[in-house]
Amino acid sequence: MSTFIFALGLTLMHFLWQGLLLGCGAAIALALLRNSRAEYRYLIACVALLACLCWPALELWQRLAGDTTASGGINVLPWTAGEISDDEAWFNLRDALRYIVSLWALCAAALALRMMAGLLWIDRVSRQPASHPGQQRWERELAQLAHHFGITRAVGLRVIDTLASPVTAGWWRPVVLVPAALIGGMPPDLLQALLAHEMAHIKRHDYLVNLLQNMIETLLFYHPAVWWLSNRIRVERELIADEIAASQLGEPRRLALALSELERLRFSHHQLAQAANGGNLMQRIQHLLRPAPQALNWKAAVAMLGVAVACLSVYAQATAADKSASNYKSALVDFNSCAKPVWPDGAIAANRTGTVSLEFKVGKDGKVKDSSVIRTSGHPDLDEAARTGISKCQFKPATKAGKPIDTKQKVQYVWTLE
């Protein structure tokens, strides 16, 4: 198994507790800021979600940068006696990580294809020519709204028959997709309020943030904390857009009526772009008309505090283990002391080749002891020659806290004829 696959597997497993720790920290911060401005809660959730991407990415880089491979004709893989009980356990771990990475890659690829299909659909419908009779009027309304919001970029509008709710797509050339049913079925002043909400998303460049959210969800789909944080970002983002739209319109009640009409029609949710129906509509309506302080749910807070303490305990133990591991230095072979293995005469005459894996112990004095064959080359004479060769090597013994210790090692001899 390659070094990258092994490091990636360890990183994915470590994110299970890292994501839980980040989620608990964000939950506590959001609970403390429950009656503050939505912008503050939005920032906390965004930072926590971005940390979910950066923390494992940094760990993966550190694992790859810290990897070293032995040079020469033999390959030595060290481990401390007691840390890994036997060779079988080591290979079981590597096999498990291989399966984990394979399953993760398949699922992430499926989610990426789903996201790409949604983006291609939005791009395709955005390029469709104007065909609805009322589209030109609403294009003028949208241009006036864009000017009122201080948006200098051209904002397009498309009327889509199969769409269920307004959707904003694109960043450099944004376009608002409006369901045909709203053009004729919703009062113009309420539809204008919904378009003002979409203008708020365009002004804040929320489409780019939402794309980053989808990328993080695709890579870290297996962790519930990622989905919870991403959902909180969308909820707070909708509240912010409602506040901006209501401020520009000067009529919070009109936007609230438009949202209540959306709730009545029970529009669907679209994850690939920002729509006016994101979040809890009743919560948004109450936030516009009659914002009230939210009481702290103490039962949930105590539970989250307990989870956070448990995560901190796990983190402290992991840090202590890393510190202990940093005090350990593995045994190093002195290749100058290793004589080239002597080919058995019979093996040369019979053109025998193969690879033999040995397990042996390096004592505190650096000498090889108790070597044994864990994977034969298929030829007993080659196996014995390899054991004889490794017994002549001298090692610099492994140390822990500066003191020499006994360690077990693994080595491979490759017998080839040229």
Image (cartoon, rainbow, N blue to C red):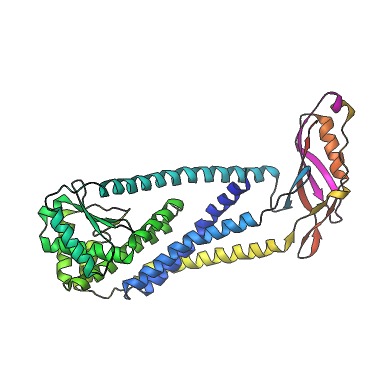
| Vertical side of 183 occupied by 29: above or below | below
Task: For the C terminus, give its image quadrant.
Answer: top right
| Vertical side of 177 occupied by 403: above or below | below
Work out whether residue 299 or residue 252 is closer to the camera in this orientation and state it. 252
Q: Position of residue 43 (x, y in %)?
A: 39, 69
Q: Is residue 403 magenta?
A: no
Q: Position of residue 407 (x, y in %)?
A: 77, 53
Q: Is residue 357 magenta?
A: yes
Q: Is residue 11 visible to us here?
A: yes
Q: Is residue 236 visible to us here?
A: no
Q: Position of residue 278 (x, y in %)?
A: 27, 59
Work out whether residue 144 or residue 38 is closer to the camera in this orientation and state it. 144
Q: Residue at x 31, y 65 (%)?
A: 237
Q: Residue at x 86, y 24 (%)?
A: 349
| Vertical side of 410 occupied by 277: above or below | below
Q: Position of residue 350 (x, y in %)?
A: 83, 23
Which quarter of the picture shows residue 144?
A: bottom left
Q: Residue at x 88, y 43 (%)?
A: 339
For the image shown, how many numbered marks are present on the structure? 0
Q: Is 220 situated left or right of 340 in this image?
A: left
Q: Is 239 situated left or right of 396 in this image?
A: left
Q: Is 384 situated left or right of 177 in this image?
A: right
Work out whether residue 400 or residue 123 is closer to the camera in this orientation and state it. 123
Q: Residue at x 60, y 64 (%)?
A: 317
Span colored in magenta: 348-376
Task: For the N terminus, give its image quadrant.
Answer: top right
